[in-house]
Image (cartoon, rainbow, N blue to C red):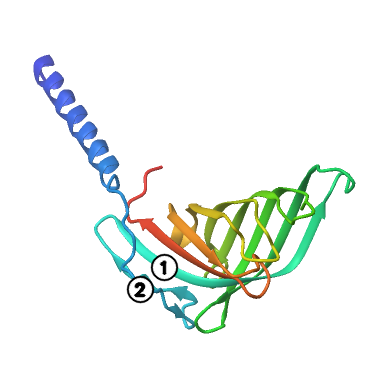
Amino acid sequence: MAPRGLCTLLCVMFLVGTLSAAFAQDANTKKPRDPPVGSLSKFNPTTMHYEPVTSDKSYIYYRIKVSLNETFVDTYTPDPKEAHLVSVVISGDVFDNSTGIKVGTFDSTSLTTLARANNELQYMGTFAVELGPNGDDAIFIMNALDRANFIQEPTDFDMAIVGGTGRYKGATGESIHSGTEVTQPGNVYVAEVAVPRFKRF
């Protein structure tokens, strides 16, 4: 092949590769939207999966409503007489709020200050909510409580969905909490999850 023809062919191949990469990156640049108001993902006990509430060209959307019930907790306090940071590990079971069926497990690790006389504290942690038949469909949530009062409903509980695995790979969104407890009976979590159809790695 003549040098000019070879050069032209290489330029065309480079251009095609560049455009393909650009289109692949643009495939999921659309921002996710909120699931329809009032919609709720239904748990399918046969497949052990939650069904999406809707989808579009870029995302699959879930609104999952569960309760967390701790079965294990371990706390490390360097000196209980002084206000040091406390490390806490909690794990337990996850139940579908509508049916009461156990749908998975959760693990949580956090750093918190000691509760003061008025029960106020600062708390930051991570939840891994493991769903699916083998526990491989996980949703990861970063959370922060500021000036929380565990006798009454937490005054400020911010939770962002920062990723996932399996069906929730690349998940984004947020979760809200209601109830007087965080990981004991009496809590309700509603997670609004957007899972991208096309993922970039």
Instruction: Report the side of 18 relative to 69 (left or right).
Output: left
Sequence-first disc among 2 and 1? 2
Instruction: Using a 10 Å C-alpha cutoff, classify the residue at mark 1 as few (fewer than 14 neighbours), some (14 to 19) or many (20 or more).
Output: many
Instruction: Report the side of 135 relative to 90 (left or right).
Output: left
Residue 89 place in picture, x, y as percent: 73, 56
Residue 130 place in picture, x, y as percent: 57, 64
Residue 98 vs 148, above or below: the answer is below
Q: CA distance from mark 2 to mark 1?
A: 7 Å
Q: Which residue is mark 2?
A: 39
Q: Which quadrant does the C terminus fall into?
A: top left
Q: Residue at (14%, 28%) from the top-left corner?
A: 12
Residue 90 place in picture, x, y as percent: 71, 60
The quarter holding residue 104 reads: bottom right
Q: Residue at (34%, 60%) from the top-left corner?
A: 34
Q: Amino acid at mark 2?
A: Ser
Query: 146 and 13: which one is in front?
Result: 146
Q: Residue at (36%, 49%) from the top-left corner?
A: 199
Instruction: Report the side of 148 relative to 56 (left or right).
Output: right
Residue 105 vs 149, above or below: the answer is below
Q: Circle 2 sits in a helix, a strand or a loop, which is it?
A: loop
Instruction: Using a 10 Å C-alpha cutoff, classify the residue at mark 2 as few (fewer than 14 neighbours), some (14 to 19) or many (20 or more).
Output: few
Q: Verify CB contact (< 8 Å) between mark 2 and mark 1.
A: yes
Instruction: Report the side of 81 relative to 57 (left or right).
Output: right
Residue 29 vs 4, above or below: the answer is below
Q: Residue at (30%, 49%) from the top-left corner?
A: 31
Residue 27 place in picture, x, y as percent: 26, 47
Q: Which residue is mark 1?
A: 63
